[in-house]
Amino acid sequence: MKKRIFSGAQPTGNLHIGNYLGALKNWVALQNEYESFFCIVNLHAVTVAQEPKVLRQKTLDLARIYLASGIDPQISTVYVQSDVSEHSELAWILNCVARIGELERMTQFKDKSRVRGENVSAGLLVYPTLMASDILLYKTDLVPVGHDQKQHLEITRDLATRFNRDYGETFKIPDAFISPTGAKILSLADAAKKMSKSDENLNGSIFLLDDADIIQKKIKRAVTDSGTNIKFDESRPAINNLLTIYQLLTGKTAEECEANFAGKGYGNLKSELAETVVEFLRPFQERVKQIDDGELEKILKTGAEKARSIARETLKTVYERMGIVGAR
Ligand code: TYM
């Protein structure tokens, strides 16, 4: 039997090249080898206020982006989180397993609550238990994510282990799959920060739906480091970042990339990179446009049915183990 992977992205903001290189690209590469579940996590999105009309639209747009990236709905299960209510049901159970202290210590929660002050929903605190539910419902082996999700994977493992200890072996303990290159693409405007959907500075991110001239401008303006040679070097994060994006999109080895830019300047790196990104995104954006609404609806419906049938079994076992019974 094939091992399983599960992953997802929030339908908030616009997906950027960091999301693609750190997550979606790996999903596509792994889908033939694993039984795959790719979810659009709209319930995570509402942990911060969303405009209903926009959220509805972004949910479907994200499904299109999954498909245009190369997720094949014939072999992978693509669905929307809210269509499978077991995610919320298991999240409640895991809220009762998690400890407030461990949730408060999560760096993403600390960062977001620092910015928002009093205006922090309880949902933001329990965000990781919903994410753990997503993963654990499917007895997932591997979770391909970017570096920023590492801590969420650790708490998922802790919650599963605690549940298994208290109620008997129920959940599979999942592993994170974090690629050695591309798991943390940095902002083009500030190499001390990761590229982020919620960054107010739009120049820091290359969005997957950006026009060619916007991409050219953003890359041209990208910050660089002191020095002149173009080599992979973690101590020069801005150049390292541009080279990493170049490497992942061209499929060249690190040596080939360095050889390609030997004796050339930052201007050459930027113009070649801009051309590479534009050439990559052109057919991608074409595919996004071509996805038929009716076809998309069918894919999401079939995906939700398949996901639900598995999620229901896991939740049933959880309820049985915990003595949760009723009339049904
Ligand atoms: P989200 O929507 O923020 O991001 C989607 C994926 O993109 C990765 N990513 C990056 N990778 C490289 N460089 C970057 N700058 C960068 N920014 C984001 C993220 O690590 C992620 O893999 N909590 C998740 C969604 C989620 C989920 C799950 C993921 C909910 N349930 C279950 C896996 C399994 C999130 O907010 O991703």
Image: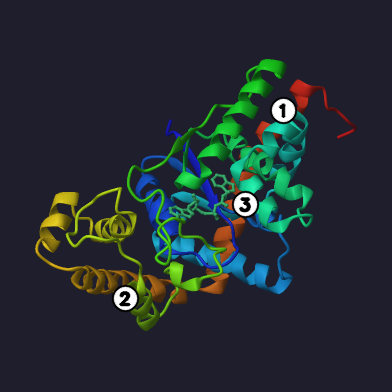
Residue type pointed to by label 1? Val
Query: In the picture shown, does residue 260 fall above or below 288?
Result: above
Instruction: Of the two numbered discs 2 and 3 on the same chain, state the one appearing first in sequence.
Output: 2
Q: Residue at x 38, y 55 (%)?
A: 21
Determine whether the residue tagged by mark 2 lies in a helix, strand or loop. helix
Instruction: Of the two numbered discs 3 and 1 on the same chain, state the one appearing first in sequence.
Output: 3
Residue type pointed to by label 3? Ala
Instruction: Of the two numbered discs 2 and 1 on the same chain, state the one appearing first in sequence.
Output: 2
**Residue that numbered label 3 is attached to:** 304
Front-lying residue, 210 or 151: 151
Return the x and y of residue 294 as percentages of the image width and height: 57, 71
Q: Is residue 207 visible?
A: no
Query: In the picture shown, does residue 188 fall above or below 253?
Result: below
**Residue that numbered label 2 is attached to:** 220
Residue type pointed to by label 2? Lys
Asked if the residue at tag 1 contacts the one at tag 2, i.e. Cβ–Cβ closer than 8 Å, the answer is no
**Residue that numbered label 1 is attached to:** 318
